[in-house]
Image (tube, helix red, strand yellow):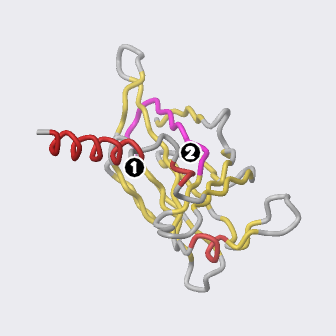
Amino acid sequence: MKKYIHYLTIAIITLLFTGCTESDDEFFSTKAVTVNNKIEVSASGNVLNVSCNFDRILNYGSGSPLDLFLTTTSRSFFFNYSMQKRNASGTWENYIPTTITATKGDNFVGSYISGIQQLDTLDTIYEYNTDITLSPGQYRVVVEPRIVSLDSQDEVTVIINTTTVGATNNILEFTVN
């Protein structure tokens, strides 16, 4: 019986020292930078346009530019935004659009939209441009102003904190007639 208690004690001690941590930064390297005005939203007629384009060589004010591809090895970055539509009682409800056309980059649509910027064929610019066609109503788009590298694997994950052009406090409200 003492032998089993001894093995159990060793197992518990091992689990304590190899347990999970709250901080991913202990295992994964991240670099956060701030560059304003990288996401843009605009509404015209019944179309909402969302775009996000930035150079592979990112100037962020520290003196030396950051080569995003060499730092992350990622050909894609993403940011999230959500849409809401005002119902008949005046309450904003989550809205999932059905007519989304990406002319550059890609979208992942769930309860929110992940706009995915992709490195162009010349390896110089990360690009995203999407048009969302809407039916009549009052809409609101809420942008999360963080652009994050995708699939950085064993390299550095880059987070670009930014602002949204065309939106107040990263929110754009508009009406489609």
Residue corresponding to mark 1: 18
Residue lying furthest bottom: 122
Residue corresponding to mark 2: 43
> Residue at 64% across / 71% down in the picture?
71
Specify the amino acid type for callout 1. Thr
Magenta span: predominant SS is strand
Q: Quadrant of residue 83?
A: top left
Residues at marks 1 and 2, CA–CA distance in whole angstroms: 51 Å
* Between 8 and 41, the one nearer to me in the picture: 8
* Circle 1 crowding by C-alpha within 10 Å: few under 14, some 14–19, many from 20: few
- Where disc 2 sits, the SS reads strand
Residue lying furthest left: 1
* Between 72 and 164, the one nearer to me in the picture: 72
Left or right of residue 100: residue 52: right
Q: Which mark is residue 90?
A: none
The x and y percentages for residue 91 are: 40, 18
